[in-house]
Image (cartoon, rainbow, N blue to C red):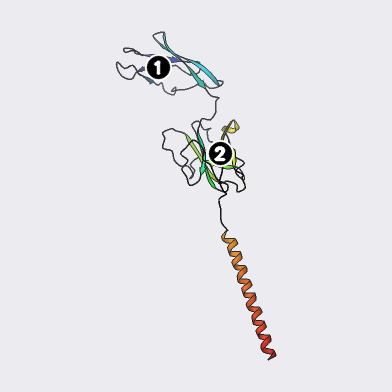
Amino acid sequence: MPPGWDTVTVTSPALVEPITLTPVKKGATQSAQVDAPGTRHRIRSGLRAGTYPVTATSHDRIVATARLKVAAEGSAETGRFVIGPKDAFPGSDVPAAVRPGGEVRVVLSDLRPAPNEDSLTVTSPIFKGPLTIRTDSSDDPGCKCDDPATVYAGHARVRDDVPEGRYTLTVVSHGGRQTTTQRVTVAGKAVAHGRSWMAGGAVAAGSVALIGGAAIAARRRSHKAASRM
C-alpha cells in the first residue's frame, strides 16, 4: 500500500470472516493482520476443494485481488516422506537407495494430521509385511526446521530377496481418506547378517557329542584289547 493508508479489509467466499489489515507501524507500506478471537485464518467448513477469489478493499475501493486454493477438508499436508538406512540421518526429501536385507528408517511429516491419529501403516513390496510408523517414536530424527508438523517414524528390514529396482511406499491416513506414495530404489549387494549364535551353539554342541562318542569308542576298544592279552 502507498504511504498514508490506514486499513484494508480482505474478504473471500472461503473465509469465515473478513481479515483486517493495518500498517505494521505509522507510515509503513507493509501490513499486519488484526486478529479477532478464534477467527485467524479460518476457512469455512464444508467447502469443496478448489480455488476461491480473495479481494482486498480500502474505503470501499478494491486495491488488490488474489486466488486462494483450498484443499479437501481433512486432507493431509505432507512435508516429507523419506526412507534411508537406519543409521543415517534422513535429511533429504529425496529417498536414498537402500540395500536388500538392510535396516531402514521411514519418516513422514504431516502439517495437517488427523485428530488422534498417532500411528500410520506403510506398505511396500520391499518389506515382509506392513510397517507401523508412530508419533513420539525413538526413530524420529528430530527436525531443525520451525514448522509445526507432526512427525511419524519407524524402522524395518528390507527383504533379503528383493531384486534391484524402484519400488513404491504407500501410506493411508486420515481414516482412509488420504493416500500418500513415495518411490525408493533398492540397489547393491544384500546385507550379510552372519550366522546366529544359536546355529553356532548347535554346531559346537554336536562337535562335543561326536568327540565324546569317539572317546567312548576308543576306551571300549582298549578294554577289549586288554582282555585278550
- Secondary structure type for disc 1: strand
Where does residue 120 sit, x and y in percent of width and height?
A: 56, 38
Q: Secondary structure at mark 2?
A: strand
Residue 77 against residue 17 in the figure, above or below:
below
Asked if 111 appears above or below 20 in the picture, the reply is below
Residue nearest the viewer, comparing 86 with 95: 95
Would residue 123 be visible to someone looking at this image? no
Residue 185: x, y in percent?
Answer: 56, 40
Residue 26 drawn at (x, y percent): 29, 17
Residue in the image at 59% along x and 67% along y: 204
Residue situated in front as seen by the camera: 165 or 169: 165
**Residue at (41%, 14%) from the top-left corner?**
9
Q: How many marks?
A: 2
For label 2, the residue is: 184
Disc 2 crowd rating (10 Å Cα; few below 14, some 14-19, many 20+) is many
Q: Earlier in the sequence, mark 2 or mark 1?
A: 1
Q: Is residue 1 above or below residue 138?
A: above
User: In the rendered image, is residue 102 in sight?
Assistant: yes
Which callout, 2 or 1, points to the residue nearer the camera? 2
Q: Position of residue 5 (x, y in %)?
A: 34, 12
Q: Amino acid at mark 2?
A: Val
**Residue reaching furthest right?**
228
The quarter of the picture where the N terminus appears is top left
Q: CA distance from mark 2 to mark 1?
A: 46 Å
The residue where tag 1 is placed is: 20
